[in-house]
Amino acid sequence: MTYTARYPEPCNKDMQGLPVLMLKHDAPEQFSLMLQQGFFMPVPKVCSLREFLCKLVGVCGVYTEKSLQTIFLDGSAVDDIDQAMIRPGCRLALSAAMPGLVGATMRRDGYFKRMREGISLSSRQEKETDSQQDKSFRIQVRLYNAVGRDLAGLFLHQGIIFSSNDLIHFFKSRPDQFFSELKNIKFQGKDLPVVQNRLDSLILPEGEIFLRVVSGEKE
């Protein structure tokens, strides 16, 4: 079941000047494989990881404490999402609890967390200047396992940056069920037809695309 607590108003208004592809799809969790591959996301200003998750994406409350069991920021394991800071160029990976001893060791505030002190995120981080805090930037995000399925709708609702070639490859690899849930396509504000429930005829420019996916009443 997807996490649908609340969908914040998208704050990425300028789309970073990229071509915009808008899809209306009733099952955004079907994009989870693509989100595991990794994508970029605009962030309006430096903030804590909790602020990024809750205020920007909409992942709040019980889910952040119970379901986000493994978090890596720039290759370091995160225990405290209030102390971890989202800064320009950082790499964020979110996962549910992983199996085995490795999973138990990497789990947030788990019993075995002392075994990974060498790769844990330090609680001491440099403070940003006022000018740095107010500048928008992008980060890289990967969503693994159940987290990718649960949170796909929230991240895609805000909008992500993805390679146009990788996006076309993803569409071509999707089963018919994926296209049965696809209701509308807009590129640069213009409606495009879905030909025979496929997107093989979709032509996108080389480079990066700003992709936003909405579903039903969340539009």
Image (cartoon, helix red, strand yellow):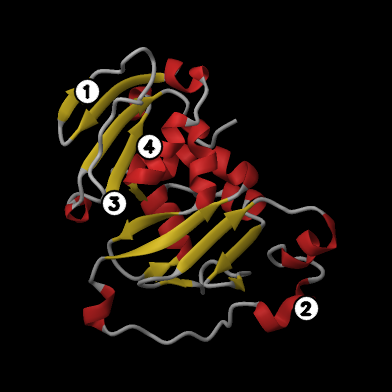
Residue sitting at x 38%, y 20% = 198
Q: Is residue 197 above or below residue 203?
A: above
Residue 49 in the image, given as x and y percentages of width and height: 47, 64
Q: Is residue 24 above or below residue 34?
A: above
Tell me where residue 9 appears, x and y as whole percent: 29, 43
Residue holding disc 3: 208
- Residue 62 locus on image (x, y percent): 60, 48
Q: Nearer the viewer, mark 2 or mark 4?
A: 4
Q: Amino acid at mark 1?
A: Leu
Q: CA distance from mark 3 to mark 1?
A: 19 Å
Marking on residue 192: 1
Dot 3, crowdedness within 10 Å: few (<14), some or many (≥20)?
A: some
Q: Earlier in the sequence, mark 3 or mark 2?
A: 2
Q: Which mark sits nearer the N-terminus, 3 or 1?
A: 1
Query: Residue visible at 28% across and 75% down?
Result: 133
> Tag on residue 168?
4
Instruction: Give me the residue at 22% from left, 51% from top.
Output: 15
**Residue nearest the observer in this picture, 119 or 39:** 39
Of the image marks 2 and 1, the number of the one nearer the N terminus: 2
Determine whether the residue tagged by mark 4 lies in a helix, strand or loop. helix
* 68 sits left or right of 45 in the view: right
Residue carrying label 2 = 114
| Cα separation between marks 3 and 2 | 40 Å
Q: Amino acid at mark 4?
A: Ile
Q: Secondary structure at mark 1?
A: strand
Amino acid type of the residue that numbered disc 2 sits on in the rendered structure: Arg
